[in-house]
Image (cartoon, rainbow, N blue to C red):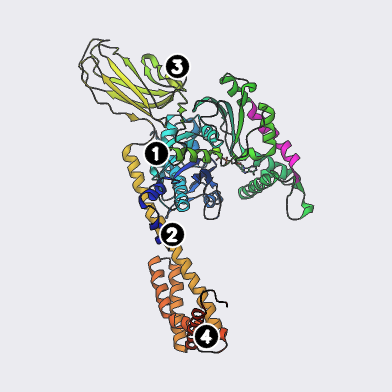
Amino acid sequence: MADALYDIAEPGESKAKEACAGRAVGIDLGTTNSLVAAVRDASPVSLPDAEGRMLLPSAVRYRADGAPIVGREALAAAALYPHDTIVSVKRFMGRGPKDAETTRRFTPYRFVEGDGPVVKFAVAGPREVTPMEVSAEILRALKVRAEVALGGPLEGAVITVPAYFDDAQRQATRDAGRIAGLEVLRLLNEPTAAALAYGLDKKSEGMFAVYDLGGGTFDISILKLTGGVFEVKSTGGDTALGGDDFDRALAELIVAKTGGDAATMSASAQRALLDQARAIKHQLTTEETVLLDTRPESGSVTRAEFEAAILPIVARTAAACKRAMKDAGIDRGQLDGVILVGGATRVPAVRAFVEELFGHEPLADIDPDQVVALGAAVQADLLAGGGPREDVLLLDVIPLSLGLELMGGVVEKIIPRNSTIPTGAKQTFTTYADKQTGFDLHVVQGERETVNECRSLARFQLKGIPPMAAGMARLEVTFLVDADGILRVMAREQTTGQESSVEVKPSYGLTEEQIEQMLFDSYEYAEEDLTARLLAEARVEAERILAALAGALVSDGRLLSAEERTAIEGTMAGLAEAVKAGDHHAIRKRTSELDLQTKPFAERRMNEGINRAIGGHQVDEIGDRVEHAKGTAAHEGPGGGH
Ligand code: ADP
Ligand code: MG
């Protein structure tokens, strides 16, 4: 039926539309939660998982065998498998083992020793995984979810990143997308995505503050919007401030009320307490009072008490906001709007605080924990050419200047920060010593003047220049930043007219081969994932048949001879055995055996059921009566009446 309808539509046109529209997604790859959205019927919507949930906790648990577990289930077992469950992996993107981010933080992870460019976790398997691979697991889970929801393979994805992410962190995010088998259409700044979700585009102009309070991070960005260009004027925040701190403050309040002692609690009791605190925190967003237990006498927490406990934490966001406005060269009177992002901004006291701070009632009618993904979906739709808004020009800017190290560790900026992307620049350099036959080039990113205070992005060499006197060689260096803010550097010696090839060896990120290996690994797992799904489906089907048959044996067992019954019960036991053993081929085989074997039983039951319904007549007789009734109807004509 559906096929027939499909053929009636103009095949070429409708199929082309179907292939493009709605198959590009936006992904918010968050520190705490991740989610995926797509434009459907001209507006962006989040895509739910099988249980209808939008947020996927950004947690990945590796196991000794089998594919990693992603999301809620991984998070729930994090305390049991502290080394194998990676949470907040976003903090490690684009970071090396010697990076402050890796060494500073107290984490339960086992980092692989070494000074390679990429930090690695040693996890069950045993395996060594990079942050890109961990993120790829999260992305893959969202990809599968989106493919199910949209009914087919994805065209591509826009993935969001914090505005302050440097080139290495962006490249790592892009690599994660590739490992997950996604076509990354573009990386998009999170505040820009939020602004897009609110429909701020070509038609809007002005200064906007985006206040993003997530689970463990606080980001403030000031965006300037002119003629479709989003310029990040300034960013700031605190990488150790978020809703998790509210949980801890509330947990302390609960302990104080119930007279416990957090210091002497077991680790699992502490975990349980924090979970309880988070649940109560969520309730207090909409309710004034929440009971600590089902029994009223065990006490309650009021919203006012909670607000008093978190106020010092919320107040810590003020300094960063003021600094960001100062950096952007504006005061709050010059702001045209404030946008709320992040689950923790659902807390009414946070909203009130933001309003007070900026003197603006913040925009909050889009779910703050979905707004970034929704904006990314709008952008993805534009890039995939789906929506009617193809005319919207949307440009982003590079967040930090890109440059080269010169003699003496000084940095020469080639592309200044806030250049709109894509962008490029050329600069010419010369040799510093006589008879120099090569150049060492060191690409850095940052605003500081000395190389030690900038981030090292790549080192490469240009060799094969004929020996010349100092100052004679002319080296032209080209920097190109593509629409994702990702950099390519090329160098050419000009005086000799001779082109030398250069190889950029990034000191971060992954080589082509590494990515290929990871893609390969992921295919291996993909097969495993598929097997797991086939098994799950086969099991469900088998269990359904076994349950139905068990019921039928009780109600209609008398329709079977003793031998028939024994035979069926034998096959049932065999199938139950196969379900336990977990081989989907065996389960399928026995399911069809059982199906075939019980056909006569099913027929007898059906006959009997019909007989019962018509009060003892034989089925053949009924057939006659139906024929007869039809004949009568035909005779009387379609109207049926006189
Ligand atoms: P991230 O950007 O770090 O991935 P999210 O934007 O998803 O994080 O925010 C997660 C935080 O939001 C958590 O601390 C969570 O408890 C909090 N949160 C989510 N929903 C609510 C709510 N209804 N009330 C209060 N806090 C909430
Ligand atoms: Mg976020």
Q: Secondary structure at mark 4?
A: helix
Q: Are marks 4 and 1 in contact (CB under 8 Å)?
A: no
| Nearer the camera: disc 4 or disc 1 | 4
Q: Secondary structure at mark 2?
A: helix
Rendered image: mark on residue 533: 2
Quarter of the figure that contains the N terminus: bottom left
Q: Nearer the viewer, residue 627 or 97?
A: 627
Magenta segment range?
A: 301-318
Residue 434 vs residue 284: left or right?
Answer: left
In the image, residue 506 sits, relative to residue 493, either above or below, namely: below
Quadrant containing ligand 1 reads top right
Q: Secondary structure at mark 1?
A: helix
Q: Are marks 2 and 4 in contact (CB under 8 Å)?
A: no
Q: If you read the primary sequence from the N terminus, does the residue marked by circle 3 or circle 2 appear first?
A: 3
Residue 490 vs residue 158: left or right?
Answer: left
Q: What amino acid is labelled 1 in the image?
A: Asp
Task: Find the distance from the CA under tag 3 to the CA under tag 1.
Answer: 29 Å
For label 2, count other residues whose C-alpha is less than 10 Å away and answer few (under 14), some (14-19) or many (20+): few
Q: Farthest front residue?
A: 642
